[in-house]
Image: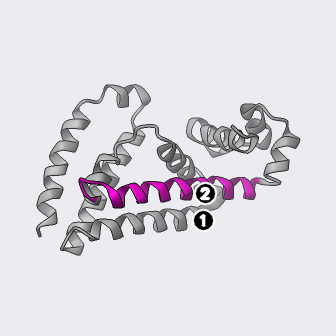
Amino acid sequence: MSAREKILDAYEALLIEEGERATSLNAIAAKAGVSKGGLLYHFPDKTTLIDGLLARLEQLAHKDLEAMAQAPEGPSNYYLRTSVYADSPLDRAYVAVSRLRQDAAAKVARAYEDIQGRWLQLIRTEVKSEAAARAILLLGDGLYYNAALASSETRAQNQALQKDLEALLEVADKLKTL
């Protein structure tokens, strides 16, 4: 793993674990195991660090969108199944970026609107009604929101979520026909 990736991993972890206020350049460098000069070589300031994390999110979302477009079960079911927080690289980047609202609110909003718009566009390919497509998107958002807010212990033990997911997949199948 490159020093640049280690720095982004450290930044991401600090955002998730401790929030935006804990992400001083010194704290990020220490968590990444690099000198502050090494951090500054790759990211001269906080803005370029934020941009690096947003670029990582975009890259991961792009891969996810490709998988969603090619999913045998269809985009809607893929979207719902992957809306359960699994601590994947995309999950971690998505949650970390959500913690940047103070330092980069406009950039974060644009990134989320773009990603969510592309998810909705793929869902629309198999759903007749615009309202039904949006409902499926919101079902996934709700699953993700609830799973992401749960503690790691709760997520690991949450078998009820799997039952909820199966029921929501049935609802999504019905929504596709509206």
Please report the residue visible at 42 percent of the width from the left and 59 percent of the height from the top. 66
- The answer to which image quadrant residue 16 occupies is top right
Q: Position of residue 162 (x, y in %)?
A: 23, 36
Residue 95 drawn in magenta: no
Please report the residue visible at 47 percent of the width from the left and 40 percent of the height from the top. 88
Over which residues does the magenta segment extend? 46-74
Image side of residue 141 versus residue 105, left or right = left
Picture disc at residue 54: 2
Total numbered badges shown on the rendered structure: 2
Front one among 79 and 154: 79
Colour mapping: one colour
Q: Secondary structure at mark 1?
A: helix
Gap in angstroms between the C-alphas marked 1 and 2: 8 Å
Q: Secondary structure at mark 2?
A: helix
Task: Bin the neighbour count of mark 1 within 10 Å (Cα to Cα): few under 14, some 14-19, many 20 and up.
Answer: some
Instruction: Give the amino acid at mark 2.
Output: Leu
Q: Which residue is mark 1?
A: 107
Q: Position of residue 166 (x, y in %)?
A: 18, 43
- Name the mark nearer the viewer: 1 or 2: 2
In the rendered image, the vertical position of residue 42 relative to residue 160, given as above or below: below
Q: Earlier in the sequence, mark 1 or mark 2?
A: 2
Q: Label 2 near label 1: C-beta < 8 Å?
A: yes
Front one among 89 and 51: 89
Q: Position of residue 97 (x, y in %)?
A: 56, 52
Image side of residue 46 versus residue 137, left or right = right
Please report the residue visible at 21 percent of the width from the left and 69 percent of the height from the top. 127
